[in-house]
């Protein structure tokens, strides 16, 4: 009897420990791709006609000259997500483009027409469900497509986020990519106001790459793609990372009192036999601390904590990073893994287990991170940023060069929701490396109280995003990596014009810059303003009223109305804007036209010197450090820190029509933090140059 009790006790103890699934790492997976469909009368090659390993999305793709045609199905389909807390694959049932955990990779060239036949196969709401729309976040089966960062028309059936594609409805998008569109990393995601956050959190997003083959000849700008080649003229190996934060949860019965099933520590649990869903906006999305408190992990292309193995020491690779989450900052640093210690044997193979809090102890042991008060930091693996938000920079931006690992702001690649960061990565020697999401800085937790607090816009504990297992190759001292990258680019591109080659030797990318320098603004003395604020009206800097006004999510003291145009601007104009946030940080995103970051000020003073050098002393816990690499950089999304003013300049180039500005913390957008912009032909003409209002006396139908 005692033996039986002892065995049961041992079995129970094992159940309480985090499990390690099959004692093997989660393999890194590239984004899924649609299967090629043959044109009439033509036969595909064997490689194109065979389904690829992994998740095969529902739909297909056809290439016919400059026409790229997709059949893309919006479906709710069972999947599995790895939970390191239990070592098991959780069953989930999520909405997405194509039915995989992330939408299929879309690739186009400048001059292509992208024709997307979107088939909304989601079910109608069940009988008794609230009528749609019912105000606030709602209508989770109505969907559309936004081509984030693309400079294309916002009108008609192009990049029009004011469309509502109902369940069991088909719709044809046609996006004409201009011949002069920059090559770069973009993405697409659901953008039906009221359901944006829930659908993106469910997996309704995917990577969109514009590939360019225009060489720099000394006159017009070239595409950065043309110089990212090895000694054999083969393109650098490419890795695509779509970071997603999918807050799936399992709910208890009965339905009238459904609550999220949790573990004793409060993290979310999906017991065997239950299926995780993303259905409840209030409980799963709207709290600023929900992602951290849930115990869920950031995934990469649908995989949690994958191990990347196709890397050699000294090999330069192109990494495309896309933050497809809805709320939390990814504070990315890369450090070499310690090869000794109790946890090293599994960690060196890319195997981690436990909840985020449990893993934090392992990560502190094997990934030599430090807290701000530590005295033992280690050298970071540099990240050489060549493009921001898909647009090539004027020069390589070295992130983490000659800097140490700190759980804060120094040496970090801050990725906010909506950001993209293209990197040249080279690992100095063989071994295993940790790709980390460092713990949130105090500023990121500003909305939790004056002294910071748990949660906010980043994790409480440093989390592992992935491991990189680097094979033997060319050993390069860490302090020589910058010159190694520059010299490799020069050596492999000897046919460039002399001026471009000379500049490339010092990291100059001007010949391949994605956007030209902005000209003067017509309103530089009176810039337009965007002020974000969550709270009770009136918003700062106005004095509060007693009693306070309505609580809400505001831009310029107004919540979103689909029937109101807040900014009417003229096509072709170049104008300045000033962005501010009150109460907590927000993320500015504007559709169609990217902008140039002209300045960032604090207490009325610029953080930049005359040549863009950062005057802000490095602050190990300062989120404002991310602004140091933004001077005169083109972006479409930018973080707006409390008490800082971000000065931007944009040209309303080429396209007219209505689109939106909003906070890219997507639950804020659904809450009302969005505003409409209309670009018109002529502000001085009758009807702003649209229609024929001045011809009311020329009605040829009058008798």
Image (tube, rainbow, N blue to C red):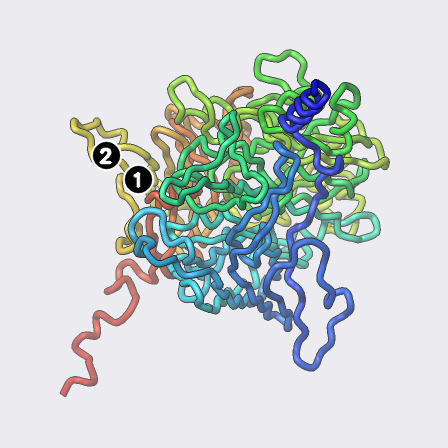
Percent across and percent down for residue 403 are: 65, 23
Q: Determine if residue 593 is in view.
A: yes
Q: According to the image, label 2 marks what residue?
A: 537
614 or 313: nearer the eye?
313
377 or 11: nearer the eye?
11
Identified at 29% across, 52% down, the residue is 134
Identified at 37% across, 54% down, the residue is 139
Q: Which quadrant holds the N terminus?
A: top right
Task: Name the outermost residue toward the left.
Answer: 703
Q: According to the image, label 1 marks what residue?
A: 554
Label 2 element class: loop
Q: Which mark is residue 485?
A: none
Identified at 75% across, 22% down, the residue is 338
Percent across and percent down for residue 320 are: 64, 45
The span from disc 2 to disc 1 (Cα, nearest Å) is: 9 Å
Percent across and percent down for residue 9 are: 66, 22
Label 2 environment density (alpha carbons within 10 Å; few <14, some 14–19, many ≥20): many
Q: Determine if residue 526 is in view.
A: no
């Amino acid at each position: 009897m005692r033996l039986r009790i002892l065995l049961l006790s041992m079995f129970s103890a094992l159940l309480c420990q985090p499990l390690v699934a099959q004692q093997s790492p989660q393999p890194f997976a590239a984004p899924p791709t649609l299967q090629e469909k043959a044109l009439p009368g033509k036969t595909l090659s064997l490689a194109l006609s065979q389904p690829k390993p992994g998740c095969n999305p529902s739909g297909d793709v056809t290439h016919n000259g400059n026409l790229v045609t997709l059949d893309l199905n919006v479906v709710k389909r069972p999947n599995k997500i790895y939970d390191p807390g239990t070592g098991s694959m959780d069953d989930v049932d999520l909405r997405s483009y194509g039915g995989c955990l992330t939408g299929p990779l879309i690739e186009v060239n400048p001059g292509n027409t992208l024709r997307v036949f979107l088939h909304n196969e989601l079910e109608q709401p069940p009988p008794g469900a609230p009528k749609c729309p019912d105000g606030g976040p709602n209508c989770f089966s109505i969907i559309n497509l936004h081509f984030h960062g693309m400079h294309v028309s916002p009108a008609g059936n192009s990049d029009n986020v004011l469309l509502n594609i109902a369940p069991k409805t088909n719709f044809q998008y046609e996006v004409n990519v201009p011949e002069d569109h920059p090559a770069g990393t973009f993405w697409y995601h659901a953008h039906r106001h009221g359901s944006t956050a829930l659908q993106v959190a469910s997996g309704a997003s995917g990577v969109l790459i514009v590939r360019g083959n225009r060489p720099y000849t000394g006159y017009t700008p070239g595409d950065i793609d043309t110089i990212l080649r090895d000694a054999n003229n083969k393109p650098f190996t490419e890795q695509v990372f779509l970071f997603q934060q999918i807050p799936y949860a399992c709910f208890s019965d009965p339905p009238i009192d459904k609550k999220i099933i949790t573990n004793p520590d409060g993290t979310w649990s999906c017991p065997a036999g239950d299926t995780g869903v993303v259905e409840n906006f209030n409980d799963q999305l709207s709290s600023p601390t929900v992602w951290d408190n849930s115990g869920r992990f950031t995934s990469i292309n649908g995989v949690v904590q994958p191990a990347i193995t196709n890397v050699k020491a000294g090999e330069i690779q192109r990494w495309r990073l896309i933050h497809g989450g809805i709320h939390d900052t990814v504070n990315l640093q890369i450090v070499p893994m310690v090869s000794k210690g109790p946890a090293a044997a599994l960690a060196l193979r890319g195997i981690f287990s436990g909840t985020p809090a449990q893993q934090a102890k392992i990560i502190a042991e094997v990934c030599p991170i430090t807290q701000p008060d530590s005295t033992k930091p280690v050298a970071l693996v540099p990240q050489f940023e060549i493009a921001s938000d898909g647009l090539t920079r004027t020069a390589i931006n070295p992130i983490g060069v000659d800097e140490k690992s700190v759980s804060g702001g120094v040496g970090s690649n801050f990725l906010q929701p909506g950001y993209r960061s293209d990197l040249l990565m080279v690992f100095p020697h063989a071994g295993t490396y940790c790709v980390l999401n460092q713990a949130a800085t105090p500023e990121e937790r500003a909305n939790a109280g004056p002294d910071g607090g748990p949660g906010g816009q980043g994790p409480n504990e440093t989390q592992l995003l992935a491991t990189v297992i680097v094979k033997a190759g060319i050993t390069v001292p860490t302090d020589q990596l910058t010159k190694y990258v520059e010299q490799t680019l020069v050596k492999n591109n000897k046919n460039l014009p002399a001026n471009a080659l000379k500049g490339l030797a010092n990291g100059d990318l001007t010949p391949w810059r994605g956007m030209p320098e902005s000209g003067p603004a017509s309103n530089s003395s009176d810039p337009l303003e965007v002020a974000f604020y969550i709270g009770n009206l009136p918003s700062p800097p106005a004095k509060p009223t007693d009693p306070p006004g309505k609580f809400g999510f505001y831009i310029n003291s107004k919540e979103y109305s689909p029937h109101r145009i807040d900014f009417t601007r003229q096509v072709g104009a170049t104008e300045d804007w000033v962005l501010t946030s009150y109460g907590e940080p927000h993320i500015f995103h504007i559709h169609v036209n990217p902008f140039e970051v002209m300045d960032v000020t604090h207490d009325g003073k610029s953080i930049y010197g005359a040549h863009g050098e950062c005057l802000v002393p490095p602050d190990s816990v300062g989120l404002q450090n991310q602004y140091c690499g933004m001077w005169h950089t083109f972006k479409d999304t930018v973080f707006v820190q409390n008490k800082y003013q971000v000065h931007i300049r944009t040209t309303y180039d080429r396209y007219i029509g209505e689109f939106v500005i909003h906070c890219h913390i997507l639950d804020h957008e659904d809450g009302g933090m969005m505003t409409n912009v209309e670009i018109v032909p002529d502000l001085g003409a009758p009807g702003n140059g649209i229609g024929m209002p001045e011809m009311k006396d020329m009605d040829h139908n009058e008798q």
